[in-house]
Amino acid sequence: MRQYLGSAVRFTIVTWLLFGLGYPLLEVGINQVLFPGPANGSLVRLHGQVVGSRLIEQRFTGAAWFHGRPSAVHDDPRSSGGSNLGPLSSKLFRHLMERRQRLERRHPSLVGKRLPADMITSSGSGLDPDISPATAYLQAPWVARARGIPVAIVRRLVTSHIRGPWLGLFGNARVNVLMLNLALQNAEHGR
Amino acid sequence: MTASAFWQIAIVLLVAGGLSVPVGHYLARVFMNERTFLDPVLDPLDRLAYRIIGRETVSVPMTWKGYAVNMLLTNVLMGLLIYLILVWQGALPLNPLHFPDLNPFLAFNTAASFITNTNWQNYGGESTLSLLSQMAAITFPMFTSAATGFVVAIGFFRALASRNGGQDLGNFYRDFVRVLTRVFLLPCLLITPILVWQGSPETLGAMAVAHLVQGGTQHIPMGPVADLEVIKHLGTNGGGFFNANSAHPFENPTPLTNFIETLLMMVTPMALVIAFGRIVGNKKLARVMYSVMALMLVAALVVAVSAEQGGTPLLAHAGLMQHAGHGQAGGNMVGKEVRFGVTQSAIFNTVSTAFTTGTVNSTPDSYTPIGGMVLLVQMMLNCVFGGKGVGALNFLMYGILAVFIAGLMVGRTPEFLGKKIEKREIVLASLALLIHPLIILVPTAWSLIAPYGVSSLGNSGSHGLSEILYAFTSAAANNGSAFAGLNGNTPWYNVSLGLVILFGRYVSIIFMLALGGSLAAKPAVQETVGTLRTDTALFGGFWLATIIVVGALTFFPGLVLGPIAEFFALHAHHMPWGPR
């Protein structure tokens, strides 16, 4: 037992140094060299300034921008998470109806229409950077109107930002809201 | 189920199953101390480790007691180290965001949780832990707890195959080192860069500040995430860097990483069953076990994916599309990410609870009643392949019970792998299995009647009951996933869940090792016509029936009050949102 105690102590320290410090630090070193962009959070820069991360949702308001999904954590990456409301929750139902009514007030064409499943539901991370193509196309007309550019151009922009499922099968087609909005801004400046 | 969902399930199963065969043979070579292709590189590393541990210690042949004592010794020391790092975090280096020390309750819960491969988290990583804690108190036990499970399983397998009365099952430290260097090290080193390439951060910068497009700022925490992700899944650990776990875009940025993480969880526990067959010298028995486990997994996947894709009347009434198509996912997208959609979310969480990883890429609390119940039931059975090592052991416990029951029914002598099953074995197997419902149901009941228990609830009614039942089931099964609406960061839940985690891990492992020792000490009996054969499809069916009957009898009342009641309430016509 005494003999084992010394061994166990030495064993604990060695594995701790190797796997608790050595392995993570080695990987940081390797990946900072190999993939500096993603290794530092896939940050997006505009005129030298960081305007967000390609992988983290940020809030867009007003009709001139595409909107991401509702976030249970107000798009604050310092406390990621979902609403954790159960399938029978009356609070969940209230949230969904409030979001729906807010949309319908601004865009009467949506009244009575079925909405894409992701449009008014909050995500698991609260930071979902994507919306489905259906949600993006649905927003295209009013974004185009607010910016005074033809709908066809906005729709074409959405189409060019769709990333299909991996191997055409795994996961869902998606549109990154930040990248789409930046492209939208760019397109308008270009005109 | 849609055709796309069918193929996604089929391909995940085929790839994992295909990989499990060569990996299983490799594991068997590692555990039987045969040559492997990595020996020239790793042998010097092993020898260095042996020298540090002590040459005498690593050359002592150990009995089951040697394995049990050294498991407890190393785990207590490691647990203590983790606890100290967490309670002194504020004073330690690599804490750029100046997070304070963890309180003793939370630190106890976290240390107990991570040293036992549970990874239940009563904290949000990005708002609680320093970078040092994430590496040295979280990533570190992800390696050692997974290796502990493996080593215990190897010891047990060798006991079943023992021809020396169980006097020499091998050496705990040797096995431990070999598992670390030969099973975990290489995949971790190689797969981390793939995750980084896809978007998972790997940095010592703790926070980026973004000045957003429409004004305002966003503080984006990050750190050494990708390396943690690999061992988190490979070791069936499950504790996330961030609160949202694998739903977080930094932990699981694309469908490709989701696929990789799913496979990492599945392959080694599946391979362990194949290795078992080679170690005990009965491949047919291993095939029966593998088939029964795979059958349970397939059923769980089909039910969970169908339930989530089916959506709910509540979502339909809110005017959401419920069918996939027209460029959207349909179904229940509450708490799910667009890039995974319904199918990849349900597959991931089902695999995570089957293999007792506990990582989630969508919030289980918001699953449909039936989808959530699938997750719960798999943790209650705790042997649908199961976590590192212990899943196979639990399955064998059910097997020993099944042999005994079948023997009684048809009047054969109960034998397993050429050893007579007698009173002592049945008592130990029953204890190892019964501790599980005991430590789930008693604290669940306690929490339901105590004000400090129900005050943590995030949902009311039957879903609230499910939240508490899920928490203790997850803790007892050393899973770690949660119906996260329940606030577990209170003294009551920190301590009670911490204790359940410790009992669920060590008490059952010690009973299992004792059972192994007891079988090893017995003389082998010759197989006769009177022997009940355990390596047949017929017995496999009986094995499955035993698991389901024992599991159902034990947990059915809880399921009726929780998810089943919720299912009927949800589909009833008189709900708060009016008739459909």
Image (cartoon, coloured by chain):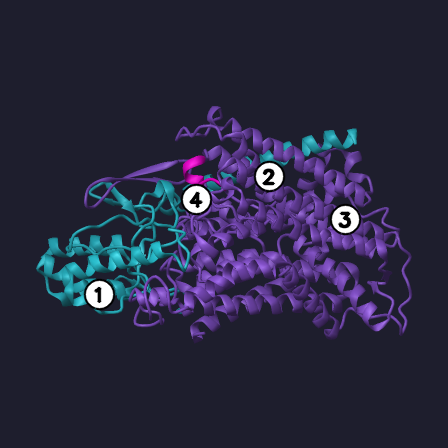
Compared across the picture, whether A100 is left or right of B341 comes to: left
User: What is the spatial separation of the Cα atoms under label 2 and label 1, in whole angstroms?
Assistant: 49 Å
Q: Which residues are magenta?
A: B122-128
Q: Is residue B362 above or below residue B287?
A: above
Please tell me how crowded label 4 is: few (under 14), some (14-19), or many (20+) other residues with Cα within 10 Å. many
The first of marks 2 and 3 along the sequence is: 2
Of the 4 image quadrants, the one containing the C terminus of chain B is bottom left
- In the rendered picture of this protein, how many numbered marks are placed on residues? 4
Query: Do the residues at pointers 1 and 4 share their chain?
Result: no
- Closer to the camera in the image, B112 or B189: B112
Query: Do the residues at pointers 2 and 1 share their chain?
Result: no
Query: Which residue corresponds to the image point at 61% horizontal and 51% vertical from the top-left?
Result: B441
The amino acid beneath tag 4 is Phe
- Label number found at residue B513: 3
Secondary structure beneath dot 1 equals helix
Q: Chain of mark 1?
A: A
The first of marks 3 and 4 along the sequence is: 4
- Closer to the camera in the image, A12 or B397: B397
Mark in the foreground, 2 or 1? 2
Please tell me how crowded label 1 is: few (under 14), some (14-19), or many (20+) other residues with Cα within 10 Å. some
Compared across the picture, whether B198 is left or right of B533 comes to: left
Q: Position of residue B133 (x, y in %)?
A: 50, 34
- Label number found at residue B320: none
Q: Which residue is mark 2?
A: B112
Q: Which residue is mark 4?
A: B242
- Label number found at residue A138: 1
* Colour cyan maps to chain: A
Query: Which residue corresponds to the image point at 40% horizontal and 44% vertical from the top-left?
Result: A39
The amino acid beneath tag 2 is Ala
